[in-house]
Amino acid sequence: CPITNADINQRVFMLTDEMIRTIEITDLFPFATASWESLPNVVLVKYLGVIDRERLWITDNFLSKSLQNLDENPFAAVYVITPDYTSCWQIRGKTCIHQEGEMFEAMRKRVHHINPNLPARSLVILSIEEIYECLPGHAAGQLISKRANSTDTSGNCFEH
């Protein structure tokens, strides 16, 4: 059955355990941004992780065009697929960029522990607003989850 607006308004928004496990074991993630003129850009990112069930972190090592796009248009999407190709999701949301602070330093420490030669220039935090099904079939493209009553339109991130 298709998802109705009433269903969406009643949903509790969060990443599922399966999504979190998949993110933890996946090596590369397509990361999509668009300029204010709607020109798309997609890159592969390696350092992406879960902050909590509503936020992801992405390391900017070499995201020059992506960061320019995010400065113009803070919305982005990440594509996540299980290693056996049995599940996949498009995760969309609003981003903000940090170049200092506790979360930024924790990201740099994690990245430099793995590869001290990477710059880890910025921390991009994606506040998840929607998750879509991506597997081919009758549910392809359907909204799985939507943040209920999202009121933050500033794009500002907060640290826990």
Image: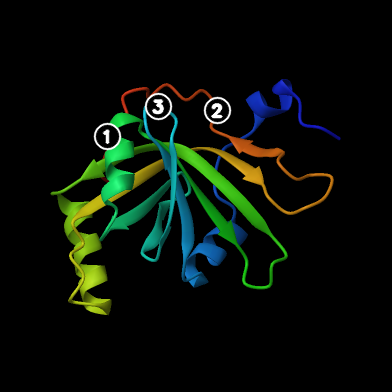
122 relative to 1 in the view: left or right: left
Q: Is residue 110 above or below residue 1?
A: below
Q: Which residue is mark 2?
A: 148
Residue at (62% x, 66% y) in the render: 82
Q: Compute the Cα span from label 1 to label 3.
A: 12 Å
Q: Amino acid at mark 3?
A: Glu
- The circle on residue 3 is none
Sequence order check: which comes first, mark 2 or mark 3? 3
Nearest to N terminus: mark 1 or mark 3: 3
The spot of residue 32 in percent (x, y) is 46, 46
Q: Position of residue 127 (x, y in %)?
A: 41, 40
Q: Residue at x 59, y 53 (%)?
A: 16
- Height in image: 74 above or below 42? above
Residue behind mark 3 = 37
**Residue 102 or residue 43, whichever sits in front:** 43
> Of residues 108 and 136, which is closer to you in this image?
136
Q: Is residue 17 left or right of residue 156?
A: right
Q: In which image quadrant can residue 126 be found?
A: top left
Q: Position of residue 25 (x, y in %)?
A: 51, 72
